[in-house]
Amino acid sequence: MSTVRPDAPAEPDVDNERRRHVSDYFRLERWELPSDDAGQPAGVRGRAPVDDHTRGPGGGLRTGGLLTNLDSLGGFTSGLAVLPQWIVTTSLLATVSELRHVGPLGFRVDVVRRGRSSVVTAIDVVDEGAGARHVAAATLTCAVLDPGSMALAFERPVVVPMPPPQSDPVGPEAFFSIEPGAGPVTRLLLDDRLRNPWGILHGGAVAMLADEAACRAACAVPGTTGPNGVAAADAVLHYLRPVKVGPVEARCTVLGTAAGRTVVRVAIHDVGSDDRMTNLGTMTVLAV
Amino acid sequence: MAFGGYPPPEHLLGDLGMEAELTTAETAWVRTRATPFVAAADGAVRAGVLATLVDIVGGAIAARVLHPDWMATADLTVQRVGPVLGPFVEARGSVLRRGRTTLVIEALVVAVHEDGRTVEVDGRPADPVAWASMTFAVLPARDPAPKVTMPAGLPSRWAFSGGGLQVPIHDTVGIEVVDGAAGHVSVPVRPYLHNSFGAVQGGVIGMLVEAAGAEALGAAYGGVGSDVVVTDLQIAYLALGRIGPVVSSARVLEPGADGRGSAVVELRDAGADDRLMTVANVVAVPAATLVGTTA
């Protein structure tokens, strides 16, 4: 049986490690638990190291990276639950209580609702290097799609090993082609390696852009930064429409600041696609 | 807008005294008075009450946009972002995306006067009270006689009238704290709390999630639920709660260095084989860090 990873790049581009695909960048390994229920996953588990170049000002894995892993794992699990159909993320709701991580991070993913048109997964994240402290939790909702001509066949239970370390790693901003800048608008260039198999911007790239954009917007407000700057924590992201063309702009509005937390509304637009809004949500940015 | 007899005369929405208006085909507002009975420990309106407000504004817009189809709330988020100045809070909702199977709505909650004028501070509109979002699942119409009668023209205004709250909202709802540290609260299902499906209303779910999360996080801080203020609710609605009692459990995450805490709350319908109804993330901060930020 042939195996096509649904999160594999449409055109593999592995000749340059700097150009690894989104799902490999954070070196996420994942494995499906054996199931007695034919076809239905009993659950999926994952693990990802916290490489130095992926750490943020909070000391642990940047929240954009954590959200990328949540999107990859929740989407993967949801997809397995609806085979031979597949899925696309529609909303990601996450709380990150602890920004300092030793690593590796362990992920537990369970399907909590499987409907005809949508699947909901609940995901818990523990810091395995720090006594399995529970550091984050999320729910991911996916819409069920007809995969069309995409071949989706898996050896079950699915096991995807951890990608190797990068010999010459780059930081998330460079990897995700986020332009340098400051203030309320942050731009991402839609490189092909950032696309998922549907040819649209990977949900994790959207999350990383939201993280970076929200932090820049918060930094522009006096009194919101700490000794190490700011770091994103909780996230609400609605995936409204696919990002197809690019460039992609995250336009931020600081909604309020209280008790050391700044809530930033992030509206993401596909500039090359009639500037339509593709994602909307909020990031909670903390002084760290 | 008539909801086919919903809500009934004795209902929480009536006692909250909500007023509402569909302002355009895709926008609406819903308003309620910010009284001490709906206030959290910092004096501001509870996140669960804000969830009720935005659930109603979202539902009103969805009913209009999707007519003659109907809808069920799939997820709802509320983030308190600023102080509540009162005397009223108003959720202003608008459509973000209307798809074949889902409808996504955004709402901003602001402080207003009784006539709807935005409260100003130093000559400028006050900061928002909260930001919210909702996803509704579209339920295709099966009944040839729609249960909702749409107004002929816009704007269209209506009110849920009742006797008003006589005690704090959690007592009104009937939330019993069984084991605070475990986030175990319980509430019977009764028509007073119903939605249009005869199950527990989505905003009430928000109140239960808030109460369970606050109790668990308060205990984790060495106190009780009233020692913390819930700032964020991220709720995924999985199944209706029709029989009851609805019971909760909570798992507290590792507290961050900044004093804020998070918990995962699950709600189950104990009378329906403990069916999982809701999974939610709750974020709270010690009340002492917020007291003084609200008027």
Image: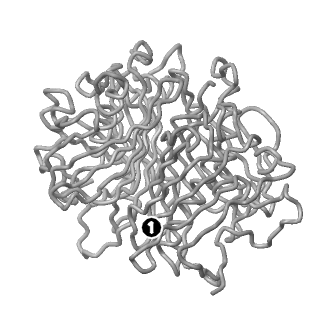
At 54% from the left and 34% from the top, the residue drawn is A98
Q: Reply above or below: B177 against B154.
A: above
Query: How far from the left and from the top, in percent, is residue A37?
Result: 39, 77
Question: Considering depth in this image, is A182 or B175 the residue closer to the camera?
Answer: B175
Amino acid type, mark 1: Ser
Query: How far from the left and from the top, in percent, is residue A92?
Result: 52, 52
Q: Is residue B126 left or right of residue B158?
A: right
Residue B115, visible in the rendered structure: no
Q: Quadrant of the N terminus of chain A?
A: bottom right
At 53% from the left and 39% from the top, the residue drawn is A96
* SS class, disc 1: strand
Snapshot quadrant of residue A222: top right
Residue A122, visible in the rendered structure: yes
Question: Considering depth in this image, is A114 or B42 the residue closer to the camera?
Answer: A114
Q: Reply above or below: A196 against A125.
A: below
Query: How far from the left and from the top, in percent, is residue B192?
Result: 14, 46
Question: Considering depth in this image, is A113 or B207 the residue closer to the camera?
Answer: A113
In the rendered structure, the residue with mark 1 lies on which chain? Answer: A
- Dot 1 surroundings within 10 Å: few (below 14), some, or many (20 or more)? many
Q: Is residue A170 left or right of residue A75?
A: right
At 15% from the left and 34% from the top, the residue drawn is B172
Q: Quadrant of the C terminus of chain A?
A: top right
At 68% from the left and 32% from the top, the residue drawn is A217
Spot the residue most to the bottom: A1
Q: Reply above or below: A147 against B82.
A: below
Question: Considering depth in this image, is A254 or A262 the residue closer to the camera?
Answer: A262
Q: Which residue is tagged 1?
A: A118
Query: How far from the left and from the top, in percent, is residue B4?
Result: 19, 59
